Image (tube, helix red, strand yellow):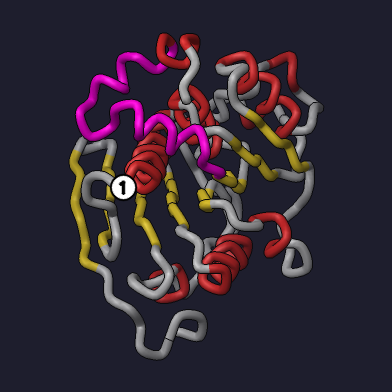
């Protein structure tokens, strides 16, 4: 049952017919792991927290740096030098003290990825392809949804992967982009909100997900476009 406090906190979203009290109960019981507490992870975590996702696990092994602050909105000037997960946990618990936030200050590796994701829905807020591929493998092996987002400058991309039903990240990406990725803060804000929307829809079982659809956002022209994705019959992960 939802408490009076929860009914008051989430009252406006409960008004959505497809959502209602039953949907809020689903969110309360949901578990989501967000890999990365940076540019993408910040808006994803923020909006999942305020929506009432019951348990959030945030994984990141980095510390807050001054160069993060143009886009990583969960971290402030006073947090420079702190572990990102600790900084994120503090802000999220202030935003919504009624949810559980678990902070894991670790790098994701081949040795720990399966243990870290456990049985949670997975959000990809990572900035490198090698770690994304580890998340992709874990999602496929454990039959967990993976909500992917990527950014470059004013451009962003998003798709939702459902093991056994859709193409995977290995089908989509072949080459890595070397060096630091240019980015303006508004781009991960847009893509992170799209990822959070996909997670909420998935948990509630409503709407149409970005499955086998690659949504591309161009901030300079302010246009969204979409590509149809297909499984790679030669994919080393999901064939």
Vertical placement of residue 100 versus 160, above or below: above
Residue extending farthest to the front is: 1
Residue labelled with disc 1 = 205
Q: Is residue 33 above or below residue 192?
A: below
Q: Residue furthest bottom?
A: 234
Q: What is the tally of numbered marks visible in this picture?
A: 1
Residue 154 visible? The answer is: no
Q: Quadrant of the C terminus?
A: bottom left
List x then y, in percent, for residue 184. 45, 33
Q: Is residue 215 left or right of residue 38?
A: left
Residue numbers of the magenta segment: 9-31
Q: Is residue 37 above or below residue 99?
A: below
Q: Residue 46's x, y, as percent?
A: 51, 27
On the rendered structure, is 150 left or right of 41? left
- Which residue shows up at 73% across the image and 69% down it? 110
Local SS, label 1 = loop
Q: Position of residue 222 (x, y in %)?
A: 21, 35
Residue at the (66%, 31%) spot, across then down: 101
In the image, residue 14 lies in the stretch drawn in magenta? yes
């Amino acid at each position: 049952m939802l408490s009076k406090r929860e009914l008051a906190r989430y009252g406006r979203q409960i008004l959505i017919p497809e959502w209602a009290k039953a949907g809020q109960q689903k969110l309360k019981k949901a578990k989501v792991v967000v890999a990365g507490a940076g540019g993408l992870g910040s808006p994803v975590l923020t909006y999942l927290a305020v929506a009432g996702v019951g348990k959030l696990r945030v994984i990141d092994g980095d510390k807050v740096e001054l160069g993060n602050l143009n886009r990583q909105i969960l971290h402030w000037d006073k947090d420079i030098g702190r572990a990102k997960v600790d900084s994120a946990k503090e802000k999220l618990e202030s935003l919504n003290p009624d949810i559980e936030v678990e902070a894991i200050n670790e790098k994701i590796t081949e040795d720990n990825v399966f243990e870290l994701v456990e049985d949670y829905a997975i959000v990809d807020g990572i900035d490198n392809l090698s770690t994304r591929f580890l998340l992709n493998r874990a999602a496929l092996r454990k039959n967990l949804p993976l909500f992917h987002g990527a950014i470059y400058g004013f451009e962003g991309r998003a798709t939702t992967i459902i093991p056994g039903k859709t193409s995977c990240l290995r089908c989509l990406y072949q080459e890595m982009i070397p060096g630091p990725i240019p980015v303006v803060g508004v781009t991960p804000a847009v893509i992170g909100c799209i990822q959070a929307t996909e997670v909420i829809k998935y948990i509630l079982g409503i709407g149409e997900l970005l499955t086998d659809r690659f949504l591309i956002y161009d901030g300079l022209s302010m246009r969204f476009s979409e590509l149809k994705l297909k499984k790679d019959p030669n994919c080393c992960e999901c064939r």
